[in-house]
Amino acid sequence: MNWELIWKYLPKLGEGAWLTLELVGIAVVVGLVLAIPLGLARTSRHWYVQAVPYSYIFFFRGTPLLLQLFLVYYGLAQFDAIRQGPLWPYLRDPYWCALIAMTMHTSAYIAEIIRGAIQSVPTGEVEAARALGMSRLQTVWHIVLPRAARIGLPAYSNEVILMLKASSLASTVTLLELTGMARTIIARTYMPVEIFFAAGLFYLVMTFILVQIFRLLERWLRVDMLQGR
Amino acid sequence: MIFDLHGFGPALLAGTWMTIKLALASLVVGLILGLLGALAKTSPYRALRWLGDAYSTLVRGVPELLWVLLIYYGSVGTVQAFGEMIGQPELELSPFAAGVLALGLCFGSYATEVFRGALLSIPRGQREAGLALGLSRKRILWQLVLPQMWRVALPGLGNLYMILMKDTALVSVIGLNEVMRQTQIAVTASKQPFTFFMVAAIIYLSLTVLSMLALQWFERRANRGFSRSRA
């Protein structure tokens, strides 16, 4: 093990790790915003409301993220309409493509988490809210979603960590996030074991920190007698 | 056929077959590793428990892609040294072998938890009954615990298999000719990226649906004679 080499490239890897965090951070937050209407629609009783989110989720959960990434990055260029459209400067950029693919991918998974969480909100609580004269929208906003948020939080934290690892795929579209940076350094130094080992450590540390943050968040969101609220 | 495949149909089909082989081979490696991991984690020896914990924590904290790359590029030196030792200096790890190792390793790290949960679900009394009947510890494991544990572990393993199926696409990065890579070759030649990546998406979706049906069959078979509790 060549420790000196690892030490020398640590700042570069740190730069990569920062981009990784940025990609994951944006993807899981925007993904959550997209996923709320999707998840709500999935719990609908009407098949025509369910159909669109169902197909969306089926597609994004049934195919590899790598494929979705290539579909956005390489695939869209096939259409002249897109290449001449106003969005082309963004859709040509690997950064935006990775963000789009990751966000859409994770929103499908988060939507399923939200559906599960919404469906496990006790029916009695929803009925109680309605009996108190809340409108259906009020019930969703004040009762169902806050309850579902607490139920779904552990699953959401799992998804965030899965996305942290999935973000390594962005290296395949030339982005220099942690894995991409490691591969670039290796192309220069021919020291795969050392550099991949160091990158792996970075991922482990990031995972560890994320787990701790979610543990705090879970405690902070908890509403029970122990808190004396 | 709705799509004009420019004569790439057979190549994509060969890629699909390669993906299936890769997924199944990784599944076998992963199941073995997962079982060993679970046995280590529930073992009475502290060193083994520590080993099991280290395995599942370390492997799960690092991206699958990094494992694929690390095993493929990182093993060159080791495998060469080993090759020279046994008199075959040309020895190297094929992309397929590296992929199976990496995906099996990752599957196994998650399966460890699934198997551990299933192991704990077998009542202690059953093991004691086995001991009282004079069965050896090996027979208790093989003929008493494992057959019952299978039923509990199946749903969890099914989920992991679905993830594994999609992770096979990562092995295209080190040049294995599975669906993703064959598609990329077709894209380079035909200049129709969207069409071909969509075809690949349909292939993956069909594989997912097929695996789901297979899993349902296994679960139904494993649950013979059990009534299902409803939530």
Image (cartoon, grey):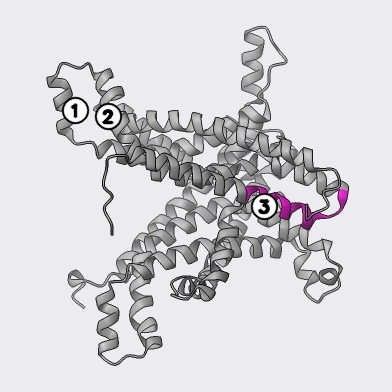
Q: Is residue B14 left or right of residue B143?
A: right
Compared with residue A59, is residue A2 higher up or lower down, i.e. above or below? Answer: above
Instruction: Please provide the residue range marked out in magenta.
Output: B190-204
Residue to which mark 2 is pinned: B145
Q: Observer-nearest residue: A160 or A54?
A: A54
- Looking at this view, name the residue that lies furthest to the top: B87
Compared with residue B220, is residue B129 higher up or lower down, i.e. above or below? Answer: above
Indicate which disc, 3 or 1, sits on the residue closer to the N terminus: 1
The disc numbered 3 marks a residue on which chain?
B
Q: Is residue B88 left or right of residue B61?
A: right
Q: Is residue B196 magenta?
A: yes
Compared with residue B196, is residue B25 higher up or lower down, i.e. above or below? Answer: above
Indicate which disc, 3 or 2, sits on the residue closer to the N terminus: 2
Tell me if I can see residue B62 in this picture: no
Q: CA distance from mark 2 to mark 1?
A: 8 Å
Q: Is residue B43 left or right of residue A84?
A: left
> Of the residues shown, which amino acid type is indicated by label 2?
Val
Residue to which mark 3 is pinned: B202
Q: Quadrant of residue B9?
A: top right
> Of the residues shown, which amino acid type is indicated by label 3?
Ile
Q: Observer-nearest residue: B100 or B149?
A: B149
Locate residue A210, reporting x and y percent. 44, 57
| Residue drawn at point x = 68 percent, y = 56 percent | A69
Same chain for the residues under marks 2 and 1 in the image: yes
Indicate which disc, 2 or 1, sits on the residue closer to the N terminus: 1
Q: Is residue A103 left or right of residue B134?
A: right
Residue to which mark 1 is pinned: B127
The disc numbered 1 marks a residue on which chain?
B
